[in-house]
């Protein structure tokens, strides 16, 4: 297999946040409804909020810096190990942040 891969990864830390909230759950919260109405329909009365896609979800997660490196296509099976080596070279690992997640890879 000839060619290169551009690999993108990020660190996984112990205190990372990841929460998925449905739009249905959000629209049940009176504080959220009040904020939406005051921001987008100021001064208008007797409003009802609804959505045509109630199954939609909003993700709340820790914003992460992403890192890139190049690897040979033949090393595809070892991408996680190569990402860990790259993070060690860059001295990215620290207490509580000692794992890697491959976010994306593309052929060059």
Image: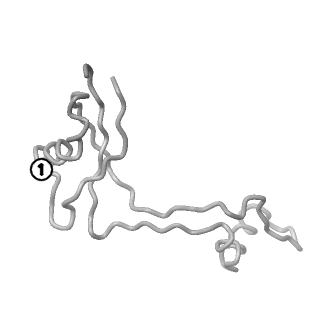
Q: Position of residue 2 (x, y in %)?
A: 25, 19
Can you say which quadrant of the picture contains the C terminus?
top left
Can you say which quadrant of the picture contains the N terminus?
top left
Is 35 placed above or below 1 here? Answer: below
- Kindly indicate the quadrant of the structure image that contains residue 49: bottom right
Residue located farthest toward the right when viewing the structure as drawn:
46
Residue located farthest toward the bottom when viewing the structure as drawn:
30
Residue at x 75% of width, y 68% of height: 37
Q: Position of residue 30 (x, y in %)?
A: 70, 80
Between 47 and 45, the one nearer to me in the picture? 47
Q: Which residue in the protein does label 1 denote?
A: 91
| 83 sits left or right of 40 in the view | left
Residue at x 17% of width, y 52% of height: 92
Q: Position of residue 76 (x, y in %)?
A: 25, 36
Residue located farthest toward the top when viewing the structure as drawn:
2
SS state under label 1: loop
Tally the marks. Answer: 1
């Amino acid at each position: 297999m000839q060619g290169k891969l551009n690999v993108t990864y990020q660190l996984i830390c112990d205190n990372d946040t990841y929460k998925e909230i449905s739009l249905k759950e959000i629209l049940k919260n009176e504080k959220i409804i009040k904020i939406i109405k005051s921001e987008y329909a100021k001064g208008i009365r007797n409003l009802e909020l609804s959505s045509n896609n109630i199954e939609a979800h909003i993700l709340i997660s820790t914003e992460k810096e992403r890192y890139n490196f190049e690897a040979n296509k033949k090393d595809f099976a070892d991408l996680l190990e190569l990402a860990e080596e790259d993070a060690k070279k860059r001295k990215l690992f620290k207490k509580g942040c000692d794992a890697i997640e491959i976010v994306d890879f593309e052929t060059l």
